[in-house]
Image (cartoon, helix red, strand yellow):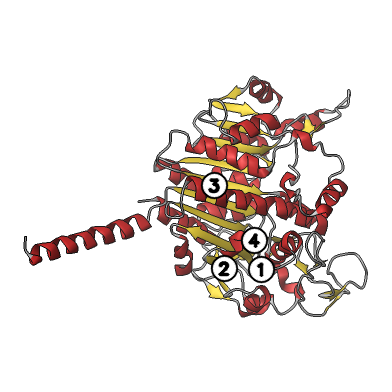
Amino acid sequence: MTKKFFTGISFLMIYLFFFAVVGSAQTAKNVIILIGDGNGFNSEWAGTYYRYGEAGKQRYQTFPVAIGCTTYSRTNKDVELPAGVTGYDPSVFWETIANGTQGTEFTRTTDSAASSTAIHGGTKTSNGRIGMTYDKKPIELISEIAVKHGKKAGTVTTVPMSHATPAGFSAHEAERGDLGTIFRQMVSKTSHLSVVMGCGHPFYEYGKPIKIKDNEDEKAKTKRFNCVDGEKNWEIMKSGTLNGFNVIETKQQFEELAAGKGIIPDKVIGVVRSLGALPPVDGNLDDVAKTRELLEKNYKNTNWKELPSLSTMSLAALNVLTKNNSNGFILMIEGGAIDHANHGRNTEKSVLEHTGFSKTVDTVIDWVEKNSSWTETLVVVTADHETGQIWGPATYNDDNNNGVYDEGDSFNEFRQVQNNGRGKAPGVQYGSSGHTNALVPLYAKGIGADLFLKRIKGTDQKAAQFWNFSGQYVDDTDIFHVIKTVIVP
Ligand SMILES: [Zn+2]
C-alpha cells in the first residue's frame, strides 16, 4: 500500500472524526434544568456562605458557564414588544435601591408564571400567564418540543405540583391561580409528561395530618383539594393510578423508586405528604451541628419521617425518565420555597431552603457523572427572579423600622451580604417582601452549554465586581433557545 493511500485514509478519518464531534456537539440526549425560585445573586451568596463559610464553593458555581440572566416580564398592553427593548438597564438598576423593580413602558418585574413561560417557551409574556402569550395564545414549550423529538419529560418541585414554575414548563393556562385546571392538563390521558412530583396533598401539611374541622366550609375544602383537581379526582388517585400514571405518596415509595427497587412505572405522579411546601429535608448537613437546630426552629410542625428530600424525588424521577429510554429526557427540578422564605424576609429559612436546593444540584451532578456524561447531558442551574431585594446590612437606613425600604428611608450604598461563617445565617438586609428585576445567576455545564456565551445580551460591570464574574448576562428566553438548539437535531 502506498503512502498516498494512507494519507487518503487519514483525511477520511479526520473528516469523520470532525463530523462526529461537530455533528453530535449540537444534540443533547438529556437536559436537566434546576430553578431556585426567588434565588437572586445575594440569596445565592447567602446560601453559599451558610453551607460553606466561603463564596464560590458550590460545585455548580465552577461550571464553565457562570453568568447572569435578566428576568423581566412584559405588560399585557396590546402591542408588539419593540425589537431591542430591554427590561434591565444596569445604569438605572445600580443608581439606587429604589430602582430594584424598574420597568419600562413595555416591561415589568416578573412573577414566576411569566418567567417560567419565558424560560420554557422562549417568549416574554405578562405576569400570571402559564405557557401563553400576553394575549392568551398558547406557546409551544420546550417540554413539548422534547417529547415531539422522542424524549420524555418530567417536573419535580418542593411546592404544589401545578404551581407556576412547573406549570410554565408544561401547561397552557391564562391565569396561574387555577392549580386544579393546570394539574388536570399535566396529568391528562394525553399529557406529554411522564413524571409530575411535588406537593398538593389534601390531607397532610409538612408530613402531619391536617386537622379537618367537622364543619369545614366548602371554600376551605375546595382549596384543600384544588392542587389535585378536586375531591373526586383524589378518590381516583387514591386507588394508585390516574390516566396511566402510577400515584405514590409515602416517603418509602419515593425512596424505593429513587433506589430503583421493584418495578419502575412508565409514568408517575408523586404527591408528597404536604399540601403547600416540602421543607428542605436535605438541609440536614451532618457536619454542621447548627443546621438541625435551625431546621427544628424554622419548621416546627414538621414530621420529617414522612417526607422525602428533593434529591430523593429527583432520583426517583430520573429512574422513571430513563427506563427503557435511549432517546433521553428533559427534567425540570424546582427549589420552590426559597422564594417563600425571601417573601417572608426570613434569612434562616432562605439559607436552609437554598441548602436543600444546592444539595439537589450535587445529586444531579453525581447522577450525570455516574449514569450519563457531560457530552450527552446539559445541566442548567438558575433562578426565575430575585425575591426580597436582599443586600448586605446597612444598604439603607430603615428609619421607620418596618423591615422594608420605603418612603422616608434613606439609601446608603449597595453592600455585600455579610459572611458569618459556615452554619451561621449570614447578615443581610431585606429591601422588600416582593420580587425585583435584578439579574439572577445562571450556571451551565455539558453539551451545548457554550451556546449561552453566543447569546450574551450585555455586560453589567457593577454586577461583575459585586458577584465576581464576567458581568455578562443573557435573557431568560435564551434558556429556551439554547435548549431547543441542543435537542432538535
Ligand atoms: Zn414569589
Q: Earlier in the sequence, mark 1 or mark 3?
A: 1
Report the Cα–Cα distance between label 2 and label 4. 15 Å
Q: Earlier in the sequence, mark 2 or mark 3?
A: 2
Q: Nearer the viewer, residue 399 or 465?
A: 465
User: Where's residue 230, x and y in %?
Assistant: 69, 28
Report the Cα–Cα distance between label 4 and label 1. 32 Å
* Disc number placed over residue 367 in the picture, else none: 3
Name the element at disc 2: strand
Report the Cα–Cα distance between label 1 and label 3. 40 Å
Neighbor class of circle 1 (other Cα within 10 Å; few <14, some 14-19, many 20+) is many
Quadrant showing the N terminus:
bottom left
Q: Residue at x 73, y 36 (%)?
A: 307
Q: What amino acid does circle 4 point to?
A: Gln
Question: Which residue is tagged 1?
Answer: 103
Report the Cα–Cα distance between label 2 and label 3. 24 Å
Neighbor class of circle 2 (other Cα within 10 Å; few <14, some 14-19, many 20+) is many
User: Where's residue 462, x and y in %?
Assistant: 65, 79
Check the image and name the residue furthest to the right. Answer: 400
Name the element at disc 4: loop
Residue 156, visible in the rendered structure: yes
Q: What amino acid does circle 3 point to?
A: Trp
* Disc number placed over residue 67 in the picture, else none: 2
- Determine whether, in the image, residue 13 is placed left or right of residue 287: left
Name the element at disc 3: helix
Mark 1 or 3: in front is 3
Question: Tags 1 and 3 in contact by the CB under 8 Å rule?
Answer: no
Q: What amino acid does circle 2 point to?
A: Ile
Q: Which of marks 1 and 2 is nearer the N terminus?
A: 2
